Image (cartoon, coloured by chain):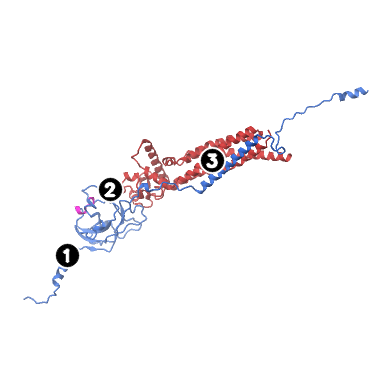
Chain colours: A red, B blue
């Protein structure tokens, strides 16, 4: 009897510890997802324009799941210490619901990360950058935001286009229909700009002389943060879920051992 | 008779030929052994859809005459065999605005030898951008405009040096230069690259774990009905046990009765 008592005590201790970890991870998940949703790199308009912004939806779900995990972990600790069957049953069912939501968030983040290819951004950039003829007001606002985002990206990361300035030469674009190829082989923001925002050497930029124009593509500057967001939500969530799985199994076992 | 030198029978045809040759050299069109080439390929904008960039003809033309003006001739390849060097630049036959429909070639980028100093300073970027002037594209009063080329080409170019209006020297014709053609936007494939291995692993593992948990929940609820499961391994909640002190008062009375 004493041995079984000890075993139960150990199980109780482990479950309390497991729930403490879940609570802390829940808070960490909430904090991480709030950070992603706040969009420090300013890339949300690009995703919104491609109609592929589900990574942000996954992050929003992550915020609420994190809170829920924290609250439920407290409930779990109380239930385990008091060995109350009802409390623990409520805990298990609510945890399973939270588990399902978090699963959805992880899978969404991972799946939509796969959609973010260079071609997706290339097509969107060529269609919307400097597009003055738009179909409706909504599109116009979106096109403006896309342009602002691209300009900011090109300025901050010293890059041009998605794979390079040759993107503007290889494909037709909205930009090309309003700006002549001889004057603007690529947008002015691809030139190295001085403090006042005008090109250091306009002819050098038009010729494509190294040092007067940005010859790198911007894809790395976009995909880097996107990967961080997506994998942050997906894999951290996956780790939490694996741990929660063990704790829940332990709790179910504990519950079945309580005599009513 | 003044003299009776015997004449060669073919001398009659030789003389006009000799005269022609004399005329040609008197025309002075010296062909320099130089082929105009595109500039270095490290330039990002070497060839665009309507412009291209050539190397400047440094150390190519002779110093004499020093006031000669060097022109660039841009022509469609069909016009090269029948190209007439003595047509003046700026005439309608050589106007940029009529190229290539009614003028098979045009002349532009005129400059004196002073702008092509020899020897070339190392580190200088010595290029000529053909097609950079966009303001005079439709201006008929500027037939020597260096305007953007109207199509992807191909085009052939050469340099020609004029003293006044008389051509003095020329280079070879370049190889045909073809400009870029932009592909239509719709050609970019918009479909994603499919699902990565990590996403598939994540989805499948999570689904399996969730299934196990649901099965556990079902098992739990099935056992809820049977409260008396596993007698020896269940444990009871620690109950509050009260101990009553049982006081047997008649034990103290006994010794008093004996006495």
Which of the 4 image quadrants contains residue A146?
top left
| Same chain check for tags 3 and 2 | no
The answer to the question of whether label 2 and label 1 lie on touching residues, with beta carbons closer than 8 A, is no
Q: Which mark is residue A23?
A: none
Measure the C-alpha gap from mark 2 to mark 1. 41 Å
Q: In the image, B143: left or right of B4?
A: right
- Return the x and y of residue B223 as percentages of the image width and height: 65, 36
Which segment is the magenta one? B92-97
- Check if mark 3 and mark 1 are on a common chain: no
What chain does mark 2 sit on? Answer: B
Question: Residue A152 or A50: which is nearer the viewer?
Answer: A50
**Mark 2 lies on residue:** B134
**How far apart, in angstroms, are the residues tagged by discs 3 and 1?**
92 Å
- Label 1: which residue? B23
Q: Give the residue drawn at x 86%, y 23%.
A: B250
**Is residue A73 covered in magenta?**
no
Question: Residue B224's spot in the image, x, y percent?
Answer: 65, 35
Q: Which residue in the protein does label 3 denote?
A: A103
Q: Is residue A19 visible?
A: no
Distance from disc 3 to disc 2, alpha carbons, whole Å, reads 58 Å
Q: Secondary structure at mark 3?
A: helix
In the figure, B225 relative to B148: above or below? above
Could you classify mark 2 by the number of other residues whose Cα lies within 10 Å: few (under 14), some (14-19), or many (20 or more)? some
């Amino acid at each position: 009897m004493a041995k079984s008592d000890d075993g139960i005590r150990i199980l109780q201790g482990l479950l309390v510890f497991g729930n403490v970890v879940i609570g802390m991870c829940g808070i960490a998940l909430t904090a991480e997802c709030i950070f992603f949703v706040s969009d420090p790199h300013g890339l949300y308009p690009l995703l919104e324009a491609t109609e592929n912004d589900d990574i942000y939806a996954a992050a929003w779900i992550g915020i609420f799941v994190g809170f829920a995990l924290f609250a439920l972990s407290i409930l779990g600790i109380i239930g385990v210490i008091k060995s109350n069957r009802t409390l623990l049953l409520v805990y298990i069912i609510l945890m399973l619901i939270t588990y399902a939501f978090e699963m959805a968030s992880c899978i969404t983040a991972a799946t939509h990360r796969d959609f973010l290819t260079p071609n997706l951004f290339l097509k969107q950039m060529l269609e919307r950058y400097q597009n003055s003829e738009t179909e409706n007001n909504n599109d116009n606002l979106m096109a403006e935001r896309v342009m602002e985002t691209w300009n900011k990206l090109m300025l901050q990361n010293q890059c041009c286009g998605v794979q390079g300035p040759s993107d503007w030469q290889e494909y037709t674009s909205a930009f090309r229909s309003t700006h002549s190829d001889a004057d603007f082989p690529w947008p002015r923001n691809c030139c190295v700009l001085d403090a006042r925002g005008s090109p250091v050497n306009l002819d050098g930029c038009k010729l494509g002389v190294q040092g007067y124009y940005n010859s790198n593509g911007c894809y790395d500057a976009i995909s880097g943060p996107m990967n961080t967001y997506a994998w942050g939500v997906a894999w951290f969530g996956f780790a939490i879920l694996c741990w929660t799985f063990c704790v829940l199994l332990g709790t179910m076992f504990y519950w079945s051992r309580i005599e009513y | 008779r003044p003299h009776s030198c015997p004449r060669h029978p073919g001398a009659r045809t030789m003389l006009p030929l000799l005269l022609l040759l004399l005329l040609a050299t008197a025309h002075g069109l010296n062909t320099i052994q130089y082929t105009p080439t595109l500039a270095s390929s490290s330039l990002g904008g070497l060839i665009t859809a309507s412009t291209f960039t050539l190397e400047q003809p440094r150390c190519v033309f002779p110093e004499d005459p020093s006031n000669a003006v060097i022109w660039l001739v841009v022509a469609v390849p069909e016009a090269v065999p029948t190209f007439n060097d003595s047509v003046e630049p700026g005439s309608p036959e050589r106007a940029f605005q009529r190229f290539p429909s009614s003028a098979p070639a045009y002349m532009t980028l005129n400059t004196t030898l002073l702008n092509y100093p020899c020897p070339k300073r190392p580190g200088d970027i010595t290029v000529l951008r053909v097609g950079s002037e966009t303001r005079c594209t439709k201006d008929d009063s500027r037939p020597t405009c260096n305007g953007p080329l109207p199509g992807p080409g191909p085009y052939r170019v050469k340099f020609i040096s004029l003293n006044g209006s008389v051509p003095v020297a020329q280079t070879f014709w370049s190889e045909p230069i073809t400009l870029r053609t932009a592909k239509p936007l719709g050609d970019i494939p918009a479909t994603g690259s499919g699902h990565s291995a990590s996403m598939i692993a994540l989805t499948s593992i999570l689904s399996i774990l969730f299934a196990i948990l649901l099965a556990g929940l079902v098992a739990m609820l099935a056992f809820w009905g049977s409260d008396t499961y596993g007698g020896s391994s269940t444990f009871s909640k620690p109950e509050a046990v009260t101990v009553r002190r049982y006081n047997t008062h008649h034990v103290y009375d006994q010794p008093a009765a004996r006495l």
